[in-house]
């Protein structure tokens, strides 16, 4: 590919570890090009960023997910052969199952459960000097997610189950112990949920139809076959785990409230502004760094030859901070969402395009509602923020404020 910039390094895997969320963005700005080629983990990878790149990436004629996610990511984060790795009709059929769980009523129901759990948590804080907000959010969300999906969960199990969901997400950019921790967490969670699926199928647990547990247990694929119990468990975990992962955005929302205290008052009674604030948290702070897909059939774009089977990475973080799309992108400013166009390829913290037609996250509505309910709780809570390290790394993926955000509730 002589027509696009080639990163000269023999292998960029180390640079990716060192630059993390900024790896693609740094090079896109350096080369003044939306795309460049680099060697990563022994293969030639095209990295691209921006609105047009996002639109291209979501063309199902040109890209496929089969073979894109490394097995190590499937064994920790996604689950092996789960929805993230599927293509075409089979993918769309299964995607509709996920979409059907995310109706506005269901989103509201979960957000209300989260609000209730925050009030319970607040009562538990009565005899505590300080709490780590990330850990509290993990517990609140795990409890609410399981209640919402009608998964039985004893209070004694809550901490471990919540930590296992976090460990799967935390394994993303890891090698060594953090990766293995995520794999063990997945094995435990899959055994737990598979057993519940089997009990529901055997009518040892009776659940209502309009619930995530029932829908996953009895879903039939495009050929009319039920998923085997293990795959049903993997996909149910694809609902539960990301709900718990909202803890990361919640922790960043708390950081934003701390760094920009002027917004607190306005957030108390202005619901429209609360949504703008939540959107800006999702845009501004780093969570998902990039996405991967493989070229389905050869084509040329911006003078670059995309070869069949080649791995292509789309820069999520950089697109959300692209100066062509966002005025002063490095400023935290919820007002930018007041008259926002809603462009599905410019704002991609949870993927781009339309969720029912491609791989975009089906859980954005849930994420927004849960964050809004939590911000509402936080702005009405009286607490101090003691001295601590709230910095977050830009090369650890996923990242979080170092302290997990400690608060001292005032009674
Ligand atoms: C897919 C991010 C919350 C369920 C994705 C993708 C991203 C993402 C980047 C991949 C998009 C792509 O491959 O093109 C996030 C973030 C969340 C979040 C940052 C906030 C914590 C949720 C929630 C749910 C959920 C709450 C469910 C309740 C899924 C599923 C997929 C997915 C099932 C796979 C979709 C597919 O492959 O078609 N998410 N998500 N996510 N997300 Fe989320």
Image (cartoon, grey):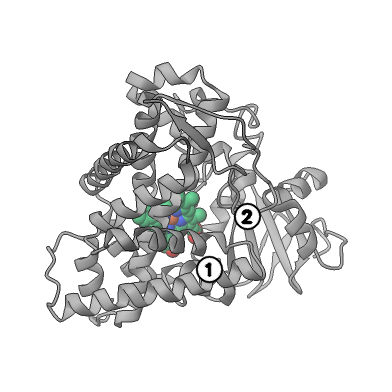
Q: Which residue is located at x 15 percent, y 81 percent?
A: 202
Assign ligand 1 to one image quadrant.
bottom left
Find residue 372 and report its horizontal and vertical position in percent: 36, 35
Relative to 380, residue 117 above or below: below
The residue singled out by tag 1 in the image is 182
Nearer to me, 37 or 169: 169
Q: Is mark 1 within 8 Å of ligand 1?
A: no
Quick one: which residue is furthest to the front in this view? Answer: 127
Task: Give the quadrant of residue 67.
Answer: bottom right
Find residue 299 and report its horizontal and vertical position in percent: 64, 66
Nearer to me, 37 or 399: 399
- Residue 234 placement, left or right of 196: right
Counting the numbered discs, the total is 2
Q: Which residue is located at x 40 percent, y 24 percent?
A: 382
Quick one: label 2, few (<14), some, or many (20+) residues within 10 Å?
Answer: many
Relative to 40, residue 4 above or below: above
Nearer to me, 239 or 257: 257
Q: First in sequence: mark 1 or mark 2?
A: 1
The residue singled out by tag 2 in the image is 397
């Amino acid at each position: 590919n002589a027509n696009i910039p080639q990163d000269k390094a023999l292998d960029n895997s180390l640079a990716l570890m060192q630059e993390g969320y900024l790896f693609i963005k740094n090079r896109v700005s350096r080369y003044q090009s939306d795309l460049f080629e680099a060697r990563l983990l022994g293969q030639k990878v095209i990295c691209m960023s921006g609105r047009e790149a996002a639109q291209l990436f979501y063309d199902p004629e040109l890209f496929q997910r089969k073979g894109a996610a490394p097995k190590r990511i499937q064994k920790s984060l996604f689950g092996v052969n789960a929805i993230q790795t599927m293509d075409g009709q089979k993918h769309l059929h299964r995607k509709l199952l996920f979409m059907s769980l995310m109706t506005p009523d269901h989103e509201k129901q979960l957000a209300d459960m989260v609000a209730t759990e925050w009030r319970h948590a607040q009562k538990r804080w009565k005899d505590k000097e300080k709490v780590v907000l990330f850990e509290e959010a993990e517990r609140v969300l795990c409890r609410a997610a399981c209640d919402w999906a009608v998964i039985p969960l004893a209070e004694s199990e809550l901490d471990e189950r919540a930590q296992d969901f976090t460990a799967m997400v935390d394994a993303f950019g890891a090698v060594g112990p953090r990766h293995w921790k995520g794999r063990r967490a997945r094995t435990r969670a899959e055994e737990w949920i598979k057993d519940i699926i089997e009990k529901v199928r055997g009518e040892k647990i009776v659940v209502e139809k309009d619930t995530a547990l029932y829908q996953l247990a009895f879903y039939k694929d495009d050929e009319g076959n039920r998923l085997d119990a293990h795959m049903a468990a993997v996909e149910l975990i694809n609902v539960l785990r990301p709900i718990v992962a909202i803890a990361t955005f919640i922790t960043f929302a708390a950081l934003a409230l701390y760094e920009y205290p002027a917004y607190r008052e306005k957030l108390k009674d202005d619901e429209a502004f609360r949504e703008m604030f939540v959107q800006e948290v999702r845009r501004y702070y780093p969570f998902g760094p990039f996405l991967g897909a493989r070229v389905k059939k050869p084509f040329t774009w911006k003078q670059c030859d995309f070869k069949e089977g080649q791995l292509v990475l789309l820069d999520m973080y950089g697109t959300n901070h692209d100066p062509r799309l966002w005025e002063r992108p490095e400023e935290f400013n919820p007002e930018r969402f007041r008259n926002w166009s809603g462009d599905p390829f410019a704002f991609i913290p949870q993927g781009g395009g339309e969720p029912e037609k491609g791989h975009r996250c089906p859980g954005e509505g849930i994420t927004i509602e849960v964050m809004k309910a939590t911000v509402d709780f936080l702005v009405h809570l009286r607490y101090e923020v003691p001295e601590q390290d709230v910095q977050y790394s830009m090369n650890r993926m996923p990242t979080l404020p170092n302290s997990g955000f400690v608060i001292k509730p005032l009674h």
